[in-house]
Image (cartoon, coloured by chain):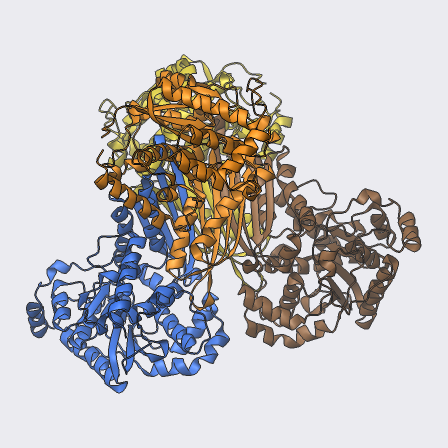
Chain colours: A blue, B orange, C brown, D yellow
């Protein structure tokens, strides 16, 4: 039960992409009781007393750079991926239309050619990073005031950016701020501009992608200063979730992993972007650190992500684990994961919105390590074992349920 | 470090079967540093301070009903299953020979035709259950005194028996004892006769099979009365281990399992016995309860175990998990496990010997729930989540390390 | 191009089951150019000159024992199995309605309880086998004359019956005919009653199931006497197709198959019927003979078919082939087939209708061995190699194309 | 039965690599009846009357650039890959020793750094391509005369070279010959130098690798002029064999392949060489052409080969085939191949030796298209369907059996 008055905003960067589309369709169906609560972590019994925001009290908006219609994207997603049925989309057409009204043009400032070419000609061409930040911030403030929101959670579900070396930027916010004032383009990626805009307007920020986003010392300082929590990065939905579950089994049984090979194929827009080697490398690094993170040694690992157009949003992963048992005997575990990526991600985005808002409400500032189980590469969290990460979440929600009756 | 003087005995029921063969080969190699400690749970760092018995301080003996040679079985196991090399067996020939000297004929009293037909004509034909118990007990006592053992751990690694209804036996030991005194055959299965013999001679007993063994109220009373700990049942080595690891993942993500199908094929002697439908049903029940035990609801499940002679000890399992994600979208996880069953089981038997001896030494009596992670169907333990079971073990060993410096 | 005037009838036994539903939907979409010709063997280039009947010249009718609507079954099939879209069904609603008008109540005479319990109370309860045959025959004749059909092909796509020993029936038609005249129930299964009705009315008959159908010497005599061709049995759609393709590879490379295990899971109505052990045994036998038929020796084989409700029409098969290479080295091939069974079967039924009609038109009588590639257990054809079977078809169609210009 | 007198030589380029090691071990075991004939195509019944050379009439020699011992490589292969047993190697030690005596240092002229670094410092450093050819030719002539061989078959089983553009070399032998006379290094890869040496000494040449070898118009002319047959390229042992068997199934059933992804992992020396992107590209091209070659259209395909050290010679391939059935329904076939690559290749090399010698004996000159079924990329053969290729072999051997009684 929500004690406080006011609505909560969920602002999606990449608001008409596959994940955001499923978030919007899912939220609309939830509020109309057209779907069950399967897939939502925050609907498990242990979250019932934590005073999380109710689904009808959420308002969705976001930034997008393409000229597409959310309703059309929803129908196409349904048809291409044979997930929910098109006629269900018709039942929530008005809800999708009202979200559509809340979507603004994002920025391509800081984006590379691969992303920029997707953008509508109507996307405003910001002349400097600071100008982009201001425009984004204005959209956030406007949304907040228009809907009288008590809190606005910004979640980045846009395409993966190429890796950036964070050490090239000053560690202090005052210096980075000055750089932004002086240089039109200090080299910050788009995801970081969004994070700055969020923090400067007092909005918590969740990085569901492996892009840089808020992962800079200067931004941590900014978040602290503005009393907002944030977390990331890279939602853990399928193959990496499996790794973070299975690697602890090998460790607990003292079975030695010799090699862990994971091949991923899929065909959605994210896959198309990842088909570019620079974008792909961000993702592969994020997927690859789990195994040795859990095991404490470095078996040979290999991760590939390949774009196979006909698969659409259905990510198929084949993992081959070669391990050594007692007396040196080599054995093999293989798994094949066939999951619809955006359908797996969407409820986690909704969960993160609720949990982040709750953390914000009780005054948590900066990193939220208790959200580690949602991410492939949780900021500042060494624990890579999914179940230990999940226990951190359970313990936090237990403490919230007892100490902060809503 | 072992503070107390004296050796510890490990008594294997089924002492020349596949698991026991690997236990003996493994123990011999460990004591001569011919193999690494991979696969041994008790060699993980968290067990280092718990005062567990050192490998050289263990003496192995056992009961067997077939006329085969341990060294020959070891060589055959190596060749047929392409595991360790035959020439390694030659290096430990003397150790195997000395174990061979400690092996006595077991009993087939209480066994069905399927098992009895495997027995050597030289196996003594006991005329009553009580006579069988006495003969077994005499072997245990003799072994104990001959080697001046401070403790003797009896572990059942014999073939799976058909299921028995435990409610047909009296719940009090005094009544069961009287029955044994009065009736030549009160219908107790062989595994239970061994358990009675163990308890009556003060030996802890571990049931590594799904056979009935000590799982009767009357035997619990007997164990309590004789101050011995015991645990079971059915070692968790491969496919069921995977289930107890993956089912918690589905639960933690609120993904609804629609069906879980597991097909197991293998070709060792155990598989041949399990090819008999009555023996198989014990195993299938034991393997099948994990999924709903973790999930808290009952998806459609199916478990098969089939004997495919050419596979030898290599158990191949294909599991197909059909689950529902957000918005009702069905997805699939499949895994294929290719493990050498006896090689997976053997280190767990050695671990259980060490841990049970430690528990016995600090005075633990009756069930040992902290050993649940080793079993498919841990006695009296509802928790089916492998990692929660493993935490119980870690917590116990932590407490032992601190409270009972050896 | 069709030279002769008149339409061709396709009469489906089990006219509202999964396969028949997909046949009707598929035929309707083909005639309206709403779908491509993928999956239709007779649309391959080598069939172009063979004078096969055009899709618009086919009229569909059939027998069914359940009270369900074809349009509803089509919509349900689309939703449950996420195959074609429901709105496509709307576009062909009138075609489905006109097929619906041509469907008559079948008979449950000769069926066991498992099948009989599915039947509508409105299904006429025939008092004798002969009465059932006459009623069926009347329906066929009526359909033929009402649509002025030049030929009517009867195809059995009903549920699998339990196995029947064919040797219990007289080998001569005159004797079987007399039995039918004298005894109300001479023990013939339903599928055979349909075959007799078809032959007596001059209709070719295709047995797409492993049921007995026309596979009796007496019926062969009847077919010859009435100048009709027939063939069967058991459509080869998925796992068995794979076997008939892969076994020849092992043979050609002189690799020795040690074991071939195939586990099939699915959840359609056919699966529910097959869940009954007696019905299942017919199917398993039919699936199991391919491997040794190709190889010429008998590796250990195992076939299971299990009903997993949630899978609907999606048949998943896991096959594990253990084989020996040079120098005795054992290796493994595994495959996983995820196919929608009725969608795989439907085009083959349409193909068989066209090919059988063509054979009938040029005067072929009795068995049609050139259709072997369509069946798991082709009548009287020893060749189990799919590609050799397919060459028989190609050679026949080549000869038809040249010798019988239409 | 061999009518002609004299022995037949088999000369292996890469004579101590994995394949050659298994060829030598296999040949030695065959001649001593220590192994069965499983895996040898030419031991199938249809080859019995073709007058192929008997195993004891073959003498093995070869070129190698590394300083290793064949016996040691054999034992290591046995241990690392758990294939044949080490003690079997002891039984054939004398045979291996006599082959060892026939092995000469090959050349690294024309090889890149990746290969050259493997070479012993004792390998003669030829100063020109022509000098390398002459030295190789001298070794062949010497071997031939020393053993009084009636024929010497040269088979390239060395590591894969990077791709070379064949159009850069003159199409006429006279011009290429002149180039070799005038320029120290006209840029020909090592495999081509071996082929020239073979042809100039009248030896048939089989290219079991995807390296350039004899695949130049000028070399075809040279082969014709010297009356020798030759063929290649790239032995078809595992995943590609599967492709050439399964793709025809999809074609025959008119099922449309949308994508075909194949990931290969293995850890032998060949894999280490292929880990270099330039060497890998030769292999990937060769593996990738089969699918569209059979289907006649171009589905999206992807082939990867990755070096995973711990797997040794055990090549594991996962193939994911996404295909469209009737009514546009997408389905999936996946297979996992776990084969020991050199064990699969070795008998084919022995088969090719016998078949090539037979072809040479009856005067066949130039390409041997009837050997297409042995190769991933058979020279000048469009037919990619394995069974059609195999029929070409059967027809040829049938004609040889009848027309050329030995």
Say if B17 sits above or below A18 in the image. Answer: above
Name which quarter of the figure residue C249 lies in. Answer: top right
Q: Position of residue B341 (x, y in %)?
A: 44, 35
Q: How many marks?
A: 0
Q: Would residue D385 be visible to someone looking at this image?
A: no
Q: Quadrant of the C terminus of chain D?
A: top right
Q: Position of residue B297 (x, y in %)?
A: 48, 59
Q: Nearer the viewer, residue A115 or A285?
A: A285
Query: Is C255 drawn above or below residue C288 in the view shown?
Result: above
| Looking at the image, residue D256 lies above or below residue A134 | above
- Left or right, residue A122 beside residue D358: left
Above or below, comparing residue A73 to residue C359 in the picture: below
At which x and y percent is residue B183? Answer: 60, 30
Picture residue at 59% right of the left edge, 51% below the top: C306
Residue situated furthest bottom in the rendering: A146
Q: Where does residue B59 sit, x and y in percent of width and height?
A: 35, 23
* Residue B166 appears anywhere in the view: yes
A298 or D322, nearer to the observer: A298
Q: Classify residue B264 as left or right of residue B113.
A: left
Q: Nearer the viewer, residue A80 or A51?
A: A51
Q: Quadrant of the N terminus of chain D?
A: top right
């Amino acid at each position: 039960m929500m004690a406080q008055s006011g609505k909560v905003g969920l602002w999606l960067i990449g608001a008409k992409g596959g994940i955001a589309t499923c978030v919007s369709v899912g939220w609309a169906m939830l509020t109309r009781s057209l779907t069950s609560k399967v897939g939502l972590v925050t609907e498990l019994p242990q979250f019932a007393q934590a005073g999380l925001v109710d689904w009808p009290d959420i308002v969705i908006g976001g930034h997008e750079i393409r000229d597409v219609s959310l309703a059309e994207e929803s129908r196409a997603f349904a048809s291409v991926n044979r997930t929910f049925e098109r006629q269900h989309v018709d039942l929530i057409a008005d809800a999708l239309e009202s979200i559509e009204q809340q979507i603004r043009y994002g920025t391509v400032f800081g984006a590379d050619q691969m992303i920029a070419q997707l953008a509508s000609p109507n996307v405003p061409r910001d002349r400097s990073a600071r100008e982009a930040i201001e425009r984004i911030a204005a959209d956030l403030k406007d949304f907040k005031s228009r809907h009288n929101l008590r809190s606005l959670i910004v979640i980045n579900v846009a395409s993966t950016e190429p890796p950036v070396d964070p050490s090239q930027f000053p560690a202090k916010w005052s210096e980075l701020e000055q750089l932004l004032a002086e240089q039109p383009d200090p080299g910050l990626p788009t995801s970081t501009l969004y994070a700055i805009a969020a923090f400067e307007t007092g909005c918590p920020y969740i990085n569901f992608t492996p892009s840089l986003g808020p992962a800079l010392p200067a931004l941590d300082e900014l978040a602290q200063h503005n009393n907002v929590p944030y977390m990331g990065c890279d939602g853990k939905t399928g193959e990496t979730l499996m790794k973070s579950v299975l690697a602890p089994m090998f460790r607990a049984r003292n079975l030695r992993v010799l090699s862990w090979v994971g091949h991923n194929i899929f065909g959605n827009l994210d896959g198309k972007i990842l088909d570019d080697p620079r974008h792909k490398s961000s993702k592969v690094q994020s997927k690859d650190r789990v195994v040795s993170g859990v095991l404490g040694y470095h078996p040979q690992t290999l991760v590939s992500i390949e774009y196979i157009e006909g698969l659409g949003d259905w990510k198929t992963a084949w993992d081959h684990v070669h391990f050594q048992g007692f007396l040196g005997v080599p054995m093999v575990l293989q798994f094949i994961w066939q999951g619809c990526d955006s359908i797996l991600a969407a409820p986690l985005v909704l969960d993160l919105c609720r949990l982040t808002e709750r953390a914000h409400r009780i005054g948590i500032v900066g990193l939220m390590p208790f959200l580690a189980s949602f991410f492939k590469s949780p900021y500042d969290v060494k624990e890579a074992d999914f179940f230990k990460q999940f226990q951190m979440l359970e313990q936090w929600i237990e403490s919230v349920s007892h100490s902060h009756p809503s």
